Image (cartoon, rainbow, N blue to C red):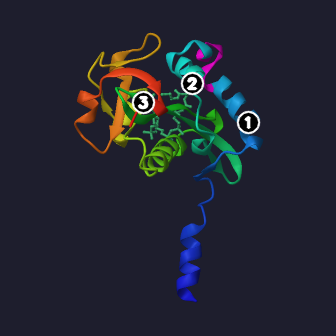
Amino acid sequence: MTTLVAAEAVATPLSGQPVVRPATPADDAFVEDLQAIAFGPGRFARTAFRVRERFPIDPSLSLISEVDGTPSGSVWMTPISVGGMKGYLLGPLATHPNFRKRGAGKLLAREVSKRALARGEGHFVLLVGDQDYYCPLGWVPTTPGNIQFPGPVDTSRVLLLADDPELAKTLTGSIAAFEAGV
Ligand SMILES: CC(C)(COP(=O)(O)OP(=O)(O)OC[C@H]1O[C@@H](n2cnc3c(N)ncnc32)[C@H](O)[C@@H]1OP(=O)(O)O)[C@@H](O)C(=O)NCCC(=O)NCCS
């Protein structure tokens, strides 16, 4: 009995703290509004957006963070390949301004990457983002110019998470369809 109570206590989210769950179609309006708030009208011109135009996101890897039952953040994943190797492009990642600095963004980035790589098909999680935010989570800078995006990108922001510590240095090629990789 004591053990059961202890287990339940661990599973119960702390009030005010973000938890993560898979997104459902009922979250679509929240996510659309959130991305508009977080990235503005310029979001459609972003290079990462062009990748998602060519290659669809995997809805089973869309996650929502919520705080006390209220959606607070969102992350998407796009299966891709680079240089014949399968992986994922993470983004957009956004937390609603009312819920920032509670750990939701880092929780979403970590959790979606863990779930994607655990499938055993993709070998890396690529993203375009701030080193100060993502490097403490395990992402490392790639070799500038090695990974070609379908548009301009600040190469110092092209970051990679992988089990293989050498991959960020060596991965080379254009972003292509997931199916084009192994
Ligand atoms: C970036 C973003 C997702 C962070 O969400 P969040 O839920 O507040 O993140 P967390 O609570 O996990 O982390 C917050 C910490 O990261 C820091 N941080 C936030 N954005 C940062 C950035 N771009 N670079 C470095 N640090 C950053 C915060 O200052 C805070 O620091 P603290 O813990 O020392 O106070 C959110 O600010 C957001 O939606 N921004 C607009 C969209 C965006 O830029 N998305 C990322 C695209 S790469």
Tell me where the magenta segment starts and ends, as one range. 38-43
- Which residue: 63% across, 40% down? 59
Q: Secondary structure at mark 1?
A: helix
Q: Secondary structure at mark 3?
A: strand
Residue 28 numbered mark, or none? 1
Percent of width and height locating residue 72: 65, 42
* Residue toward you, 26 or 176: 176
Mark 1 neighbour density, 10 Å: few (under 14) some (14–19) many (20 or more): few
Choose top left, top right, bottom left or bottom right for residue 97. Answer: top right
Answer above or below: position of 52 versus 95.
above
The Cα atoms of the two marked residues, 1 and 3, are separated by 26 Å
Percent of width and height locating residue 116: 48, 45
- Which residue: 37% across, 24% down? 158
The Cα atoms of the two marked residues, 1 and 2, are separated by 16 Å
Answer above or below: position of 98 versus 42.
below
Percent of width and height locating residue 98: 65, 37
The Cα atoms of the two marked residues, 3 and 2, are separated by 13 Å
Main SS of residues in magenta = helix
Residue located beneath label 3 in the image: 81
Is residue 26 in sight in this rendering? Answer: yes
Percent of width and height locating residue 174: 39, 19
Is residue 89 in sight in this rendering? Answer: no
Mark 2 neighbour density, 10 Å: few (under 14) some (14–19) many (20 or more): some
Residue 52 numbered mark, or none? 2
